[in-house]
Image (cartoon, coloured by chain):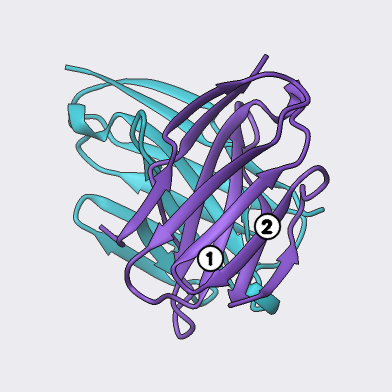
Chain colours: A purple, B cyan
Amino acid sequence: DAGITQSPRHKVTETGTPVTLRCHQTENHRYMYWYRQDPGHGLRLIHYSYGVKDTDKGEVSDGYSVSRSKTEDFLLTLESATSSQTSVYFCAIRDAGSDRQHFGDGTRLSIL
Amino acid sequence: GQQLNQSPQSMFIQEGEDVSMNCTSSSIFNTWLWYKQDPGEGPVLLIALYKAGELTSNGRLTAQFGITRKDSFLNISASIPSDVGIYFCAGQLNNAGNMLTFGGGTRLMVKP
């Protein structure tokens, strides 16, 4: 257990509404990541953070924003959700001296 | 972006059989990682490989980092029912953020 908590675990919402997913970690890891998982695509990186207020885009960042105002929390926001953003979202953490990413249990998001 | 081709997409085997799966890339990676995902959970790291030609074992699992640095293999010996799940390969470059590129996954089903 890498001390990662994702919330909510499940959410159903309507197209056009804003949605924020939270990733909380308890072990002071520097790097945090948001991925989405869709059938046949494995996991694809949305955004990542390398410190408080330091973030960068991943492969599929369009339509998503992130914020990290403190070490333990990394928020993923969909400003105006679309049906194509229906997916399972995973948060991951990594220590600065390690190559290994460890994942949370995911948030299943359905946008109707 | 970079593509990782993972095969086979699914396997249905008898308990006790050995399993092989592989991942190929059009690009070179510095690190290869293999993860397993159980239903409703996040991926869990099984094996990490850091050097071309490296062969690493973790119990009944053995993985190899291909000589060309463009491929990796995972073998599971004497499969058991709890091996059921989805196995993902991931390649990593030592770039900013150490971002991972994932394969599409191999779904393993084991018949007792």
Q: Position of residue B66 (x, y in %)?
A: 56, 63
On whether disc 1 and disc 2 are found on a single subunit, the reply is yes
Pointer 1 or 2: first along the chain: 1
Does residue A11 show up? yes
- Give the camera-side residue of A38 and A67: A67
Mark 1 residue element = strand
The amino acid marked with disc number 1 is Met
Say few, some or many: other residues with alpha carbon within 10 Å of mark 1 (under 14 / 14 to 19 / 20 or more): many
Position of residue A103 relative to residue B87, above or below, is below
The quadrant of the picture occupied by the C terminus of chain B is: top left
Between residues B41 and A78, which one lies in front from this camera angle? A78
Q: Which residue is mark 2?
A: A66
Q: Are marks 1 and 2 in contact (CB under 8 Å)?
A: no
On the question of residue B99 being in view, the answer is no
Q: Which residue is mark 1?
A: A32
Distance, label 1 to label 2, CA atoms, is 11 Å
Residue at 39% from the left image edge and 77% from the top image edge:
A28
